[in-house]
Image (tube, rainbow, N blue to C red):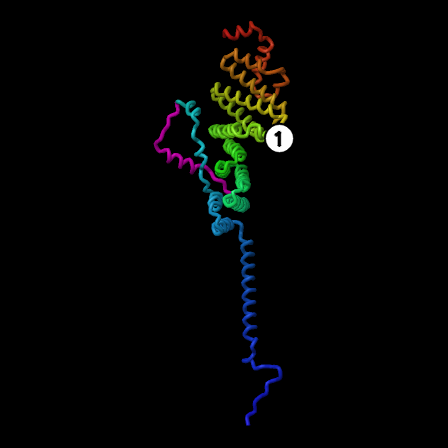
Amino acid sequence: MENKSTPKLGSFPKAFNPHLRKNKNVKKNQEEERKIMQEKELLESKEKSIPILLSKEYLARQLIENGYIDSYIDFFYLGWKKTPNIKKDYTMKSPEEEDEEEDEQKIEENEEAKKEQEDLSIPRHDYNLNNLENFYYKLKDAEDALRKSELEGDPKHDIEAIDKYNLIRNDTLYQGIPLESIYFNKKCIDIAKKNGHTESLIKSLIYMGDCFDKTNLPADMNISKRLKEEAKDIFIEKLEGKNYPLEMNIYKALKDLYSELATQQEQSKNYKKAIELLNKLLEVLEKAKSILGKLSEKNKIGFNEKEIEDRKTEAYLKIADIYYIMKDYKNTIATLDLIPNIKSEDYSSLSVRKNKYLLFLIIIAFSNSRIISLCSDI
């Protein structure tokens, strides 16, 4: 008779345990899940600890993988110093400027090659990775806002995008090389024009002028003038009397520009053009004065009545100075007569050459019919 071991009460042979296989599978799944989580955390930790010198490639890859195609292109331009030279798109002369340069010979041969050479000679800024990470988020936010604008048709999203590109423009402009700032400012202008945002368009045109001012090149200052005058013309056509702070910003943008350009023209002995610019300055100052009472104190910063009068006096003295150089003594006296209550203390700090002040005082003091007659006969 065979001896068979009797199983203990409440236990089963291993082969017959119904929960064993299930428990093993559950434990295995949990271990695999835990391992995956640990690997993910380790990967994230490694990504965070990636040396900053390698992160621009990572950020660029993130943009392209997540479908931010436009942002990827812009980020590539910034990160790899490839920003296109759209500055040359603004160098076309106006009809007036063409007329002023009658002696200029237009050479069409090899023009494209020259442009390419000029493009290569313009330095691009080497932004550090902290800058690039900042740009990365702003570019994403701008593209997100533009997508929302397309989907929802809500103009506020366009303004959000413009604001983000404006921030990048500011960040790039004050690095000292305005090429990138011109590129991003152009995006703001295009969005504003496309969707009819008049106020944003006016501001973007003014800012674009500031970008060209930053190059400190005389030709670029003329481009700045053209852009800021375009902003003024759009304002007069569509917003005059509706936004006094914006109007004052236009006058602030133009006053120093007209003065600087007039000085350039005077130094080049282009006296008629210098007088024309100074008269434009006087017009801007008069318009600024007319709206001072409609502005809050905050919006008057950089423009008060005394400053306006001082700047007008300076402009009149410069015009008189130029007429005197031209030996047009009659207009010298006529211009000085336009200055109300002129006193020596009113112009002691002005920039007109002081050796002419004595002459002005003599003319003012003795400008009777005999003196005027003598001057006109010279």
The amino acid at mark 1 is Asn
> Which residue occupies 48% across, 48% down?
68
Q: Nearer the viewer, residue 261 or 283?
A: 283
> Which residue occupies 55% across, 24% down?
284
Q: Write down the quadrant of residue 357 in the picture.
A: top right
Q: Which residue is mark 1?
A: 299
Q: How many callouts does the rendering have?
A: 1
- Say which element carries label 1: helix
Q: From this viewpoint, which residue is outermost toward the front?
A: 153
Q: Nearer the viewer, residue 31 or 286?
A: 286
| 127 falls in the magenta region | yes
Percent across and percent down for residue 314 are 58, 20
Percent across and percent down for residue 257 are 53, 27
Q: Which quarter shows the N terminus?
A: bottom right
Q: From this viewpoint, which residue is outermost toward the bottom?
A: 1
Camera sees residue 334: yes
Q: In the figure, 30 relative to 322: above or below?
A: below
> Which residue occupies 54% across, 56% down?
46
Mark 1 crowd level (few <14, some 14–19, many ≥20, 10 Å Cα) = some
Camera sees residue 129: no
Q: Nearer the viewer, residue 207 or 59?
A: 207
Percent across and percent down for residue 320 are 54, 16
Q: From this viewpoint, which residue is outermost toward the left?
A: 109
Percent across and percent down for residue 115 are 40, 35
Magenta residues span 103-129
| 67 falls in the magenta region | no
Q: Nearer the viewer, residue 251 or 45?
A: 251
Q: From this viewpoint, which residue is outermost toward the top?
A: 370
